[in-house]
Amino acid sequence: MVNLLNRVKLRNVPVLRYYIGCWRCWADFSGRARRREYLIFFIFNALILRGVYLLYMALAELTPMLSGDPSYALLLPVLVMLVPSLAVSSRRLHDCGYGAGWLIPLYLTPLIFLSWIFFLWPSRPEGDRFWDYPVEEWWEAY
């Protein structure tokens, strides 16, 4: 299993290192997060939520007790992922050169998909004021 995880790479950087790194600094709103780290974290979380949903639906067919609304099954994983998601979003905005205060208007807009434009912008040198380490070596700081 470990050998298989070492083979999964994205441009010579292990994908799971980004995901686990986000969970290690789950409440750290300072620092920077590269675009790749942000996207990997949200893609993995979406896949996990999809897996929980499919598992719930499969169990709902077998057990009549679970035939209700699947949103209750997704409530716990979403609440667990809430603070780390806000933290990595804050660090991503820092990497783009913006402060974490931009999270409030970005998440409260009716068209929340427009906020992805901010998160997908390339890194800027202005983000250096939020972090002392080079961006490529973020996991070595922890």
Image (cartoon, rainbow, N blue to C red):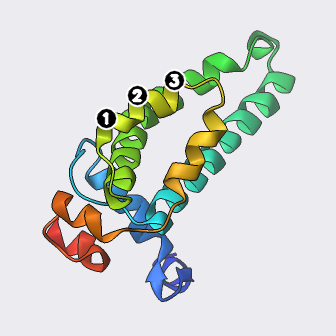
Instruction: Find the distance from the CA under tag 2 to the CA under tag 3.
Output: 6 Å
Instruction: Find out whether the residues at labels 1 and 3 contact each other: C-beta distance under 8 Å.
Output: no
- For image coordinates 45% across by 28% down, the residue present is 105
* Residue at the disc numbered 3: 108
Residue 14, given in percent of the width and then of the height, sits at 46, 78
Q: Is residue 99 left or right of residue 60?
A: left
Residue farthest toward the bottom in the current orientation of the protein: 12
Q: Is residue 132 left or right of residue 44?
A: left
Near mark 2 (Cα within 10 A), the count class, few <14, some 14-19 or many ≥20, is: few
Q: In the image, is residue 119 above or below residue 72?
A: below
Near mark 1 (Cα within 10 A), the count class, few <14, some 14-19 or many ≥20, is: few
Q: Amino acid at mark 2?
A: Ile
- Which disc is residue 104 wearing? 2
- Which disc is residue 101 wearing? 1
SS of the residue under disc 3: helix
The foreground one among 58 and 96 is 96
Q: Quadrant of residue 29?
A: top left
SS of the residue under disc 2: helix
Instruction: Find the distance from the CA under tag 1 to the CA under tag 2.
Output: 6 Å
Instruction: Find out whether the residues at labels 1 and 2 contact each other: C-beta distance under 8 Å.
Output: yes
- For image coordinates 38% across by 51% down, the residue present is 93
Q: Amino acid at mark 3?
A: Leu
